[in-house]
Image: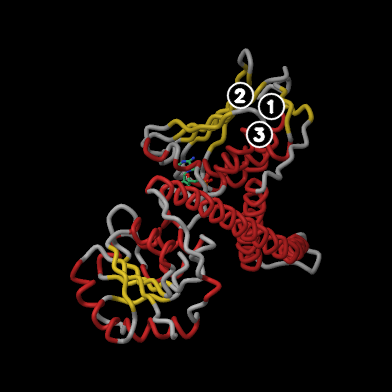
Amino acid sequence: MTHTPTILLVDDSPLVHKVYGPPLEAAGFRVLHTSDGIAAINTAMTQQPDVIVLDIYMPKINGYQVCRLLKDHAATKAIPMILITGGEAGRLVADPKRWSFETGADAYIEKGSGDLVAEVRRMLVSAPPSKTRRHPRTPLTEVEIMTALSALLDKQLYHDVSHLQELNEKKSAFVSLVAHELKAPLTVIKGSIDNMGHGTYGGLSASQRACLALVNRTVDRLVRLIRELLDLTRIEAGRIVLQRAPVSLGELLHEVIADYQAEAAARQLIIQHEGLSAEAVVHGDRDRLEQVFINLLTNAIKWTPEGGMITVALSRHAQHLRVTVTDTGIGVGATHHERIFQLFERVDPEDGQGVGLGLPIARTLIELHGGRLWVESDGQHGSTFTVELPRVS
Ligand code: ADP
């Protein structure tokens, strides 16, 4: 006796059953009708249809969930599933077709546009009714179905999160590789510029010097960007290791200020300092602390208009040392006080300066030292960035 293929049609709309039922029967199929996801799962388990035609947007448990659950179950995973949808599926996800295949569907058609009978025939050819598949199961209660679904969604979520993490790690490794590759040629360029500037290849005219200075500043910006990218990947991978030793903050700040006096003077800015005592010592990574103070000082120089004043002050407190970098610049509005410490955030993304990595990295470095970094500003009269570090003396 030849087997009559059984098609399970699942839709909460009686109209759909009226529209699709007769042509399927006319094509020689036996059609089972159910109107919700729970009944669909149980009919699929107990009746073992040869193809399931499943509406997406249904109350209680939607077509994607039914599809995922049946495709995850040994008794039903081999049954081809066609997801059908009207425009309403867009209410659940932006791209119902892609999502249907993500959830395990074998085909997807839009109500009124595809040829359902032809699609069912195609499914029967690619997955012919099989006797080995027919192991009817006892029906599941609604609670059992909901529990199975929730376990499945947890599994899926875990899989998705692990997958995203894996992708993220690959991306970080790639950024790190590119940054390393860029570093070597930039070091060569930087060395050559320095040699030219020192007259190793002969004297330079004033305009050649000006041009070289511009190249030098541009290369410095690139070097800084690459360093920030490398730091970012190290932070993401939890790979920043501090080389700690006693550091005199007073001495360190004197050096940093001296390095930037010329740049400040060129912009007619005055840098003054207060309380930079050599006895103020922290247990920290000198290079990393220097990086933080350079970031704060260069930001102050960058965001303070000509004629302004920058004050670097050091003060000792019972448990910690505090360094404040105060400028008379454009300030930071209250809504941005926390934002500027987030990765890639800048007050004005259009300004074209920097990529918004400096402050988040600086804050991470200070926190690794057991300290804090924050900003105070009324958004009009300059800003004060404060670094607080546990003190040794
Ligand atoms: P970038 O490296 O792009 O300069 P940062 O993380 O160092 O990024 O700074 C983020 C943003 O914080 C800057 O784009 C700027 O809008 C704001 N900012 C930082 N320092 C100051 C300052 N001293 N005065 C005003 N705005 C500042």
Label 1 sits on residue: 250
Quarter occupied by the C terminus: top right
Please tell me which residue lies in front, 212 or 245: 245
**Which element is circle 2 on?**
strand
Q: Is residue 378 left or right of residue 274?
A: left
Disc 1 to disc 2, C-alpha distance: 7 Å
Q: Is mark 3 within 8 Å of ligand 1?
A: no
Above or below residue 34? Residue 25 is below
Question: Which disc is residue 154 wearing?
Answer: none
**Which element is circle 1 on?**
helix
Disc 1 to disc 3, C-alpha distance: 20 Å
Q: Earlier in the sequence, mark 1 or mark 3?
A: 1
Label 2 sits on residue: 314
**Number of residue marks:** 3
Residue positioned most to the front: 1
Contact, CB < 8 Å: mark 1 with mark 2?
yes
Please tell me which residue lies in front, 126 or 371: 126
| Residue 355, position as x, y percentages in the image | 52, 54
Question: Which disc is residue 368 wearing?
Answer: 3
Q: Is mark 1 within 8 Å of ligand 1?
A: no
